Amino acid sequence: MQNTAAKACLVIALAAGFVPAQAELIDLTDGKIYDFSMSHASWKSRPNLQVPRAVLSRSIAGSYTLVIKLLVDTEGNITHTQLSQSSGDRRLDNYALDAFKKAKLHPFMIHGTPVNGVAYVPVQFIIPETTPEDASADERR
């Protein structure tokens, strides 16, 4: 099957978009923590979860889920990422952490005021099995 890596990236992006997430808002003015669903948050710039071919070729086929903790400032900048739950594949974990560092959210709001927040985002990667023709096509590139 040609373009297995491209199809895997599409599956990864789709899977990551439909996995529910949780978030906590931390309002530093009064010290309260507010819980809400990430479905109430919106991305200014989504993370690029199209895993590079080099990472795909070194990962074992299967489904991998990880959870990333994001610290978000009052402007929606992701100021810190931390692995809350590993996928079991260090390369996939590191790739996801780097991808979220480059993303940006709209600020979390409480009563119309932007606040600092903590969000937990699950990500699912689906790595397909490679066929001999996929491997030979990769070697030719």
Image (spheres, helix red, strand yellow):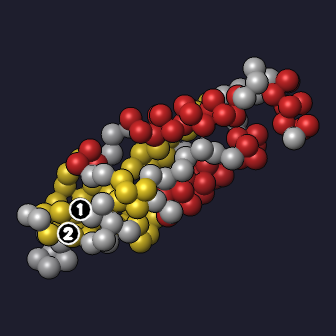
Q: Residues within 10 Å of mark 1 (few under 14, many from 20)?
A: many
Q: Position of residue 19 (x, y in %)?
A: 38, 37
> Which residue shows up at 69% across the image and 47% down it?
52
Of helix, strand and loop, which one carries label 2? Answer: strand
* Comes first in the chain, label 1 or label 2: 1
Among all residues in the image, which is located at the extreme bottom? Answer: 29
Of helix, strand and loop, which one carries label 1? Answer: strand
Among all residues in the image, which is located at the extreme front? Answer: 44
Q: Is the residue 42 above or below the residue 78 in the image?
A: above
> Which residue shows up at 30% across the image and 71% down it?
75
Query: In the picture, which quadrant includes the N terminus?
Result: top right
Question: To which quarter of the image does residue 114 belong?
Answer: bottom left
Q: Position of residue 139 (x, y in %)?
A: 90, 38
Q: Which residue is mark 1?
A: 108
Q: Which residue is mark 2?
A: 114
- Is residue 85 in sight in this rendering? no
Q: Foreground residue, 110 or 130?
A: 110
Badge 1 vs badge 2, beta-carbon distance below 8 Å: yes
Q: Is the residue 14 above or below the residue 105 in the image?
A: above
Q: Is 26 placed left or right of 91 in the picture?
A: left
Q: What is the number of callouts on the image? A: 2
Q: Is the residue 15 above or below the residue 89 in the image?
A: above
> Which residue shows up at 60% across the image and 44% down it?
50
Q: Position of residue 31 (x, y in %)?
A: 15, 75
| Amino acid on which the number 1 mark rests in the picture | Phe
| Amino acid on which the number 2 mark rests in the picture | Pro
Measure how far apart labels 1 and 2 are at the Cα level. Answer: 6 Å
